[in-house]
Image (spheres, grey):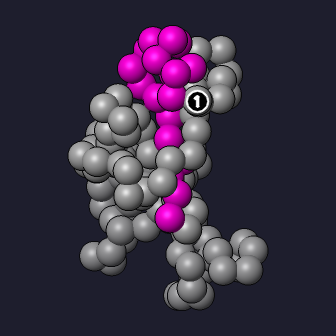
Amino acid sequence: MRDGYVVTWHGREYDAAPDGENVRIYAPEPGDGFEEARPGRYVRVLEPGEFGDLVYVRTTCSWRGEPFIVLAEADSWLRLEYTGGRAPVAHGLGLEEFDFGVYQGWAPAHEVTDLYEHRV
C-alpha cells in the first residue's frame, strides 16, 4: 500500500521526497549512487532533469461500508484513516481520534474492500 510521493528513475518507480528542486529517492537495497540511510533503506538525491514524473500516490478503500485512506500495512493489518467526515460513525467503528477530526485505526486486511491507488 502506498501513500506518498513516487518518482520514475531509469524506468523504475521509487518512493520519493521532494527536497527543493531536487528529489530524494529510496530503495530497500544498495544501488548505484545510493547511500545507506539506515539498515534496509538507501537514499539517493536526484537533480532536476534526472528523473521522470513525480506524483503523489494515495491508496483508498472501504471498510465496514465507510471510506478510508490506507496509511500503512503491517502483517495482515492495515492502518486506515477515515475520510467520511462524521464523528459519530468514526466512534462507532472504534477509531482513535488521532488529531482533531482525524480518525484512524487498524483493520484486518481481509475485511478491507475496494482498494484503489490514486495518482495525483
Res. 19 visible in picture: yes
Specify whether residue 81 is painted magenta: yes
Q: What amino acid is at disc 1?
A: Gly
Residue 43 versus residue 93 in the image, above or below: below
Please tell me which residue is depicted at 46% across the width and 17% down the height of the picture: 89
Q: Quadrant of residue 58?
A: top left
Disc 1 residue crowd, few under 14, some 14–19, many 20+, Cα 10 Å: few
Please tell me which residue is depicted at 65% across the width and 23% down the height of the picture: 97
Q: In which quarter of the image is residue 61?
A: top left
Residue 19 versus residue 34 in the image, above or below: above
Where is residue 31 shown, x and y percent of the image?
54, 88
Residue where numbered disc 1 is placed: 94
Please tell me which residue is depicted at 50% across the width and 41% down the height of the picture: 80
41 left or right, relative to 56: right
Residue 45 versus residue 113 in the image, above or below: below
Asked whether 70 or 27 is in front, the reply is 70
Please tell me which residue is depicted at 28% across the width and 76% down the height of the picture: 11
**Magenta stretch, residue numbers:** 76-93
Asked whether 79 or 43 is in front, the reply is 79
Where is residue 77 shown, x and y percent of the image?
52, 57
Where is residue 37 shown, x and y percent of the image?
72, 72
Q: Look at the image and tell me in which quarter the N terminus lies.
A: bottom left
Farthest right residue in view = 38
Specify whether residue 116 is painted magenta: no
Q: Look at the image and tell me in which quarter the C terminus lies.
A: top left
